[in-house]
Amino acid sequence: MKLVRGIDGLAFVRHSLPMFDLVLVAAIAGIAAVRGVQMGSRWALLACGLLIFAAADVVYGLQVTAEIYVLGTPLDAGWAIGLALMAMWVDGAAQARRTATPVPRQATLATALAVSSMATVAGLGVLVMSSQVPVSMLALVLAAGALLAAAVRAQLAARLLERMAEQRLVAAATDELTGLPNRRALYAEGHARLAEPGGRRQALLMLDLDRFKEVNDSLGHRAGDQLLIQVGARLQENLRGDDMLARLGGDEFAVLLDDSGHDEAVHAAARLCAAVGEPIIVEDTSLRVGVSIGIGLFPDDGPDLSVLLRKADIAMYKAKTSQLGHHVYSTADDADGEATRQTVNELRTALKSDQLVLHYQPKVDLDTGEVNSVEALVRWDHPTRGLLYPGAFLSLAEESGLMPSLTQVVLAQALDQVADWHRDGHPLTVAVNISASSLVDVDLPSQVASMLAARGVPSSALQLEITEGFLMVNRDLAQVILTRLRNIGVRISVDDFGTGYSSLAYLRDLPIDEIKLDNSFVIPMTHDARTAAMVSSTIKLAHSLGLRIVAEGVETAGTYTELTRMGCDQAQGYFMSRPVPAAELSPWLNHWHALDQSADILQLLPGGDR
Ligand code: C2E
Ligand code: MG
Ligand code: MG
């Protein structure tokens, strides 16, 4: 007992052991007081155990002092019982922790606050009392300690609050998905930069992804989110340190290019377009999405950020509809923007009021000269602007989400017409163009099936023309939807073949019946030997894969004859007939069938809608 100076061993045993026990019991009582009625029987075990243990200690201390302690009396069992009860508490507590529902954070915080407040009040009380009555040094030290701890705690809490406020500010300015600055941050930074006295030139780029909706619709929102994250990272990699990239929401991003005028902005936009255009792997699928960028310049196009944003947005729309990639705002775009909005509204009305009409262009069988199928091409019979061609309204329909309705209208009209022709003894097949945005609709196969059934038209009388773009965006979904369409008996044709940047692998993998060689190969083939070689080998490729091949854009007798020689299956073009209204097709068919194909073909007079 050398460690306890001035106190002999027996005195230490006599005073200290019961003291420690009582401190423990007091602690349990304190916890019990704070936890209130939720204590439960487990804590009673601990309290009883400690009390029995402490009682044994007190009796032991007294007996040792009186020198009457004898080993092996029932007193020794007191410690064993006390320990056993405490062990039961430990075991019960471990089990309870495994199954317990977590104590609400609010309750924990309230408890912590209550304990520290009580300690502070008690400490203050002791210090105040010490000025009136003598208080032991230990109590004074403890009270001072409690107050010091309270002061430290207050400091920590203040710092924590400060950090939380900072974090909240950062979160409010950050886009949750990509971690990029958000619209709010762009406004703050943009206003500050543009308001700088004698500020530098700034260029605002508005970016909107092309075909993002297709990805979202076909691969799901998770894939869409991953795509946005990767696009964000790519854009960031292609910017300088002083440029600010923000995500405005959806598939819209904005870039504030520091110290940049027209040329710098155009260069940056071209760089960003190229970067986003590279394939992106999302969920093991290689996707290609493009981006349309509108550019607004400060100070030329507007004095503040809101005006600049509006101008860049108008320019972006122009870039998108003209598929230019990027476009720098000019005042002429304002009128364009207004006109575009009006056209979209008119198109919405047109879809409901039978203003869309179909013209039909025959596809001639080069082997027999017969016409068994036609392509339906949509036109808009505009009340004031006359007959409009697809180039004038299809991209608007796509952009404004009207394409699915347009597809429905066209399908219904084409099938009505086929039903009429079949009744009139012309068992023609009609080919309908289906945009990628309509094809990703998983209900399309069942809608097509019921439309066919409603008119009593066989499914072999319908062909759907799709473009390579759709096959590229999502090969797996294309496989599923095309297979379902094929299963109901509808034939699938790949339109504008050769113009996409796709690989040929899809020809092998997907359920396709026919390819339509784009007119950019067919028109020059008679005066360009290399093009002719490509046409010839594409015909062989199609045949070796068991596909039929149709040449689009046959404008001359020479092309017709050459394609026949090369073994092409069908031809479509102005040479035989332009697309014509249904009423004009029957006379044309009668005229065509009356011709001696080999002799009279050169005397054909193209007619039709242009
Ligand atoms: P496409 O499906 O490749 O249709 C062929 C286009 O080539 C038609 O243009 C047709 O008029 C034109 N064409 C036909 N023969 C010749 C020729 O000998 N020489 C030249 N230079 N051109 C010829 P159109 O009618 O303006 O249609 C353009 C595109 O609009 C179509 O290309 C198709 O992709 C799309 N389209 C047309 N109708 C619809 C529709 O109902 N729905 C959808 N989603 N797209 C449609
Ligand atoms: Mg077509
Ligand atoms: Mg085509």
Image (cartoon, rainbow, N blue to C red):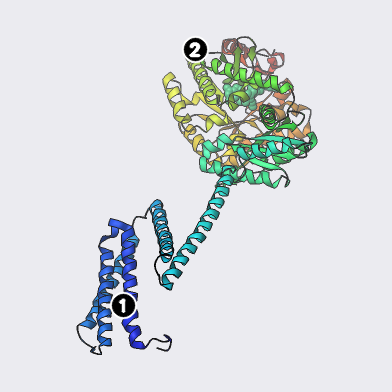
Dot 2 lies on which element?
loop
Task: Name which quarter of the figure residue 28 lies in.
Answer: bottom left
**Label 2 amino acid?**
Asp
What's the mark number on residue 424?
2
Could you give the CA–CA distance between mark 2 and mark 1, rounded to whole angstroms? Answer: 112 Å
Residue 78 in the image, given as x and y percentages of width and height: 23, 79
> From what the image shows, is residue 371 above or below residue 58?
above
Residue 111 in the image, given as x and y percentages of width and height: 38, 56
What's the mark number on residue 258?
none
Dot 1 lies on which element?
helix
Crowd band around label 2 with a 10 angstrom C-alpha radius: few (<14), some (14–19), many (20+): few
Tell which circle, 2 or 1, labels the residue nearer the N-terminal end. 1
Q: Residue furthest front?
A: 132
**According to the image, label 1 marks what residue?**
18
State whether residue 412 appears in this view. yes
Do the residues bearing badges 2 and 1 touch, measured as CB atoms within 8 Å? no
